[in-house]
Amino acid sequence: MTPAVDAAKAAGVPYTVVQYEHDPSAESYGLEAAEVLGVEPERVFKTLVAKADGRLAVGIVPVAMRLDLKALAVALGARKAEMADPAEAQRATGYVVGGISPLGQKRRLATVLDASAMSQETIYVSAGRRGVEIVLAPADLVRLTSATVAEIAR
């Protein structure tokens, strides 16, 4: 289906794929997913690509929150972080903005998952296409992405 789903399948972790009709006029892809799927926004996470000291990295935070770039920099051992250019994010991950998945990226980037995910049994992240989410245990996401867990949302 997508490289993200292929990665979960190849790793043998339990997962579910859910799809919904994406509205191209939606202001927030993540909040749209939570609303359409009837899931609490704290269980749906967005994948954001940033630059930490010039190197691309991924921050994964709940859709109703914002990525704290200072906290992301600290988690990555960097001096500062800023959002990456969308075109650069798409080239590095192989996914389009609004459908960037933390799984199955073209180039594995340093990844930080917000600590709030660990209190959930399962979380939703993009499966690599707008309107498609993959549901899995946060510990499996950490293992598959070699993520650091830190408080990076505000």
Image: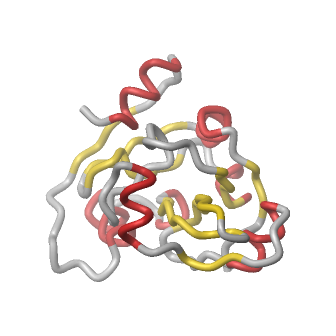
**Residue at the location (52% across, 48% down)?**
123
- Residue 152 coordinates in the image, percent (x, y): 71, 69
The part of the image, by quadrant, that contains residue 5 is top left
Q: Which residue is drawn at 15% across and 73% down?
A: 24
Task: Using the image as rendered, state which of residue 148 and residue 16 is in the foreground.
Answer: 148
Q: Is residue 3 left or right of residue 67?
A: left
The residue closer to the viewer here, 2 or 35, is: 2
At 32% from the left and 37% from the top, the residue drawn is 17
Q: Going 80% across and 63% down the picture, which residue do you hit? A: 75
- The quarter of the rendered structure image containing the N terminus is top left
Q: Which colour scheme is used?
A: secondary structure
Task: Locate residue 133, reporting x and y percent.
Answer: 35, 48
Q: Position of residue 105 (x, y in %)?
A: 45, 43
- The residue lying furthest to the front in this view is 54
Residue 73 locus on image (x, y percent): 76, 71
Quadrant where the image shows the C terminus: bottom right
- Which image quadrant is residue 130 in? bottom left
Whether residue 66 is situated above or below residue 14 in the rendered picture: below
**131 and 80: which is toward the camera:** 80
Q: Is residue 82 above or below residue 39?
A: below
Numbered label tally: 0
